[in-house]
Image (cartoon, rainbow, N blue to C red):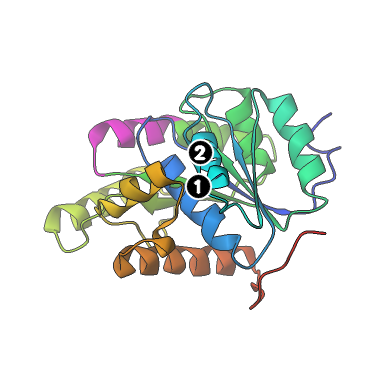
Amino acid sequence: MTIQEAGIESKIIGIVQLKGGAGRSTVATNLAAALSQRSAVALIDCDLPQGTSAAWGLVRKENDRLGNLLVATALDHEELIDKTRVLSQTQAFIIIDGPPRIAEITRAILVMSDLCLLPLGASAAEIWALSDLHATIDAARQNQYRVDAHIVWNRYRKQTRSARELSHAVQEELALPQLHSHLSFRVSYSDVLARGLWVGEWHDQIAKNEINALIMEVMDLLDVRLPTRIQKNT
C-alpha cells in the first residue's frame, strides 16, 4: 500500500534524526506519554533492533501505566504505512520514532507526518547528520511532497553564548525553522526513560514545563486544540 492510498486520519508527528543518541526516543516517549493524558496516542518505534521506545513502553506496561497509550513497532516502510493506517482509525495522534539512518522508512516518515521534529544537540556530529537529513527533506519537497520539519534543541544550555551562536549558525547553514521550546541538559530525561515514565511523572518541574511547552508549540503548528479531559479508547 502506498502512502497516498493509506487514508490516514490521525495527526502524525515524526521524530527523525540520523545521528544515534540525538534524543529521538526522549522526545518521542515524553510527547507520547504526555499527550496520552488527554488523547488516544500510538507510539511506533522504527529504530529496530535497538527499540528504545518499545522497551520504554514495555516497562510502562509492566507498571500498569500505559493507559491511553499504545506502543507498536515497524521494521520497514510497508509495515509502518499499514500500521499507521490501522491505528489512525482509533488514535488521535501517532508519534513515530525513526531510525538513525537514511532509508525508505525514513523517507516514509518525512512524507507521512503532519509535522516532523528533528532533535538536535550541540555537537558537530549531530549537525552533520542533520545536514544529510536536510538533503533528504529537500529531495522529497522537489518531488512535490509537503514536509513540515522543525528543529527541536535537545540538551540545550540557553544561557550560554555558545548555544546562541550555534543556533544562529544552524539557522544560517540549514535554513530549517527552530522551535522556541527546547529540552535542556537535565538528568531527569534519562532517569524517566529507564523507568517507563515521562518527566511529568517525576520530580522535575522544569523538565515537565519544557515538555508541556513543546506540546503547546506542536499543537499550534498542527492547529489542534487538545481536550481538557482524558479521552478513553472504546
* Disc 1 residue type (three-letter): Ala
Q: Is residue 131 magenta?
A: yes
The quarter of the picture where the C terminus appears is bottom right
The quarter of the picture where the N terminus appears is top right
Q: Position of residue 59 (x, y in %)?
A: 50, 41
Q: Name the residue located 45 percent from the left edge and 41 percent from the top edge.
A: 25
Residue 228 lies left or right of residue 132; in this view the side is right
Label 2: few (<14), some (14–19) or many (≥20) C-alpha neighbours in 10 Å: many
Judging from the image, what secondary structure is the residue with disc 2 in?
helix
Q: Which residue is mark 1?
A: 28
Count of number-bearing discs: 2
Q: Name the residue located 47 percent from the left edge and 54 percent from the top edge.
A: 30
Residue at the far left in the pictured view: 161
Secondary structure that dominates the magenta span: helix
Q: Are marks 2 and 1 in contact (CB under 8 Å)?
A: yes
Q: Which mark is residue 87?
A: none
Label 1: few (<14), some (14–19) or many (≥20) C-alpha neighbours in 10 Å: many
In the image, which is nearer the foreground, mark 2 or mark 1?
2
Residue 141 in sight here: no
Please provide the residue range marked out in magenta: 122-132
Residue at the far bottom in the pictured view: 228
Residue 67 in sight here: yes
Q: Name the residue located 29 percent from the left edge and 44 percent from the top edge.
A: 121
Q: Which mark is residue 53?
A: 2
* Disc 2 residue type (three-letter): Ser
Q: CA separation, marks 2 and 1?
A: 7 Å
Position of residue 185 relative to residue 24, above or below, is below
Judging from the image, what secondary structure is the residue with disc 1 in?
helix
Q: Is residue 57 magenta?
A: no
